[in-house]
Amino acid sequence: MSEGMLNMWISFIGMGLLLLAMGLILVSRYKLKGWASGIVSILAYLSLIIGAVIILYIVFSGPTR
């Protein structure tokens, strides 16, 4: 697998984590109460941070050959 193709799949994983974070934040705010909301919120914000780091890495790594 070429480096460009690998970067594409890694960026898809990052975008998926960002979408997952968005869904989990909505669920934790509007559907859950109590400690379950807190746990889902922590998972959501962790996936948001990891997804953002992945996307920033892909963007700032520059073009591939």
Image: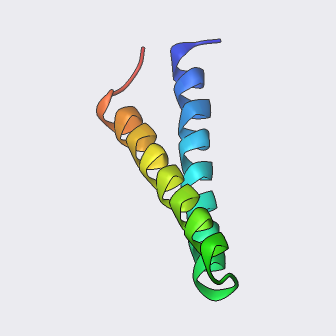
Judge by depth and name the residue closer to the eye, 60 or 41: 41
Q: What residue is rendered at 52% in x and 22% in y? A: 4
Specify whether 64 is left or right of 25. Answer: left
Q: Is residue 22 visible?
A: no
Question: Which image quadrant for residue 54?
Answer: top left
Question: Which image quadrant for residue 53?
Answer: top left
Q: What residue is rendered at 62% in x and 80% in y? A: 34
Specify whether 18 is left or right of 36. Answer: left
Judge by depth and name the residue closer to the eye, 65 or 39: 39
Question: Which image quadrant for residue 20?
Answer: bottom right
Judge by depth and name the residue closer to the eye, 56 or 65: 56
Total marks placed: 0
Q: Residue furthest right?
A: 31
Q: Against 62, is 42 above or below?
A: below
Residue 7: percent from left, percent from top? 52, 27
Q: What residue is rendered at 59% in x and 23% in y? A: 5
**Quadrant occupied by the C terminus:** top left
Q: Against 6, is 34 above or below?
A: below
Q: Is residue 59 visible?
A: yes
Residue 40: percent from left, percent from top? 62, 65
Residue 33: percent from left, percent from top? 65, 84
**Quadrant occupied by the N terminus:** top right
